[in-house]
Amino acid sequence: MGIPHLKRYLEPYAKRGTVSSCKVALDGPAFAYFILGLCLRKTSRSPFEQPSYELLGRTAIAWLDRIQECGLFISAIYFDGFLPTLKQPERMQRLLKLSQELRNYHQTCPAGVQKERAHFSPDAPVDLFPSSSAGESKGKPPVPPFLVPAIIDALSSSKRYASLTEVVPAEADVFCARHARQHGGVVLTSDSDLLIHDLGPEGSVIFFGDIDVNTETESTMTATATALQYTISDICQRLSLNPSTGMAHLAFELTMDSHLSIEQAVKRSRKEDAVSLYPEDYADFLEQYLTPEESASSDIEGTSPRLSLDPRISEIALRASGTLQPPETPDDIGRHTQAGNGLSIYLPFLLDSPLRTSAWESSKRIRQLAYTLLQPAEGKALRSVSEFRKLQTASAGIQVELLSSPAVDEEASTLLDVLSSLKLGITNPETIWLALSIYYDIILTVDQGKTRPLSLDLFRLAALGKLDQLSWDFLHFLAQAQATYYSLRILRQLISFRQQLHGALSTPMKKLDAMLSDLPSLADFPSPRGFADMLRQTKEAGALKCLAGICVEYEDIVPQLETPRPKSDKRMKRLRPPQDSTPARKKTNNPFGALAVDE
């Protein structure tokens, strides 16, 4: 989030020089976005040219290895596992903004994204320590939807960093600050909020973009790193601020009046002007930036099992388990109410077509099964979970009703049967989850009373050599496939959470857990550029023939599966995805500029 001007104002009081050997705590989310920025320097500005998850993970490991060679020893890497209630309005507004920008872009380019001239070479080396920061571009593409989980996957797969990586039951900066206070050393981040926390007498902050490695010694064992180092106790002393409260007072002054100069803000901080005039606002400010640390070190830590959960999954799991209190309704968004028992999840933002049903809808049944695993062993039962996808107005989200106890094993067995059939009938196991995406696309199409599944239309166009990888149809099915994959990931992680929290699983759940162990990591997830190849591989692996056997009772679907081709528009029998055509492409000189993400 950051405090207006705080980093810039304190820059003259930071010390630039060689960073001596020290312990380092990493702000995980900030690190993920920093790595994305490095990788984006070698790509064009199109969502089809985004860095792959494999490249992002590989670059993250290479960067950490390099700074360790310079004496910055990584001792902890923390990722957000829970965001406080007061973040709800900010998250809602961000989602509304992204949703509106996607609609705006669709109106500008109704037939799809524009092809970039720049060529992306995934094997080209990434400059880990560029001499200058990348300039902001109006054509900046949106953030890959699974950026943070992909970085966590890469770290968790590394022998060197797996034991140091943790998704914590709070915000990452809380644990980074405590680590510095207890062990001294440095916090690496991009978030100026870390300058406000109590880092102890020896703790300091270095921002990712301020680190430089001596390239002249890169090939030797004496490589060194230089950086601007913000030692808070030293800065407070130089500014004659109280070392325990001075930085919080300074940040609060800048929050209340962002037009203050550093001299004015320091003078007011010494006299506690804003703190005296606005005590309630200051109390809220402290709650936002400081007090979560106290709760993290007492009420939260040690009360929940340590599992490999993605941040969004960790948050809903902790709320449901009773470890953390459910969120309250944000005061400043009157229409945003938490339905059911107050459980909600902000799903990754996908680039799906605004003219179609949300890409998350086709795989909702998988998540419905997953959320039902959050039911407490005793006490008040959960009724629903609010999903926040793309939005037009602030709302309570899309309600996903949880399954009744008898229906859980039945739904698990149905999914297990489909997955087992796909596993037996498809020669390439890496394409099974994509075949499942096609299956759920068919299911949703029939449920909506439509006749042509989007996925099969794309296969038909591919067979005719007419597949347009820049069209909204292609983009939307890619988003559906991403949603199916991530829904399976949610299910797998919540099965593990349920087992550790409540013990034994039912037989169908045990089998499903074993089946999902083969789910590929995000590093193996195809980039948008590689998705067309995966469609081809899925067809060659016999997926359509296998699906024809699974969908045998649907007489109008089977011919499309056996030989994808144009069909007359007649109604089908029952089963369950969306259908909308797109108009001619309109040119633009600003590919996805409307979808720039301010993080």
Image: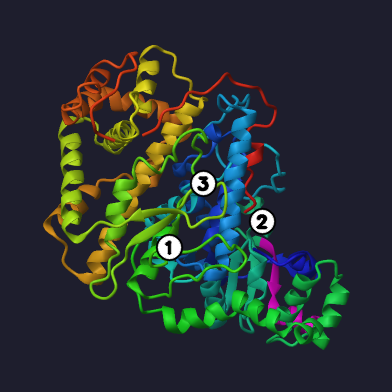
Category of crowding for the residue at label 2, using alpha-carbon neighbours closer than 10 angstroms: few (below 14), some (14–19), many (at least 20): some
The residue to which callout 2 is attached is 209
Per the model, the C-alpha gap separating discs 2 and 3 is 32 Å
Q: Is residue 71 visible?
A: no
In the rendered structure, the answer to whether residue 367 lies left or right of residue 20 reads: left
In the figure, 542 relative to 331: above or below? above
Region of the chain picked out in magenta, as a range: 226-240
Residue at the spot 68% in from the left edge and 83% down from the top edge: 280
First in sequence: mark 1 vs mark 3:
1
Residue at the spot 19% in from the left edge and 39% down from the top edge: 418
Which mark identifies residue 143? none
Q: What is the three-letter code of the residue carrying label 1?
A: Ala
First in sequence: mark 2 vs mark 3:
2
In the figure, 51 relative to 491: above or below? above
Q: What is the three-letter code of the residue carrying label 3?
A: Lys
| Percent x, y of residue 383 | 32, 63
Residue at the spot 39% in from the left edge and 17% down from the top edge: 462
Assign a secondary structure to mark 2: helix
The foreground one among 252 and 69 is: 252
The residue to which callout 3 is attached is 390
The residue to which callout 1 is attached is 339
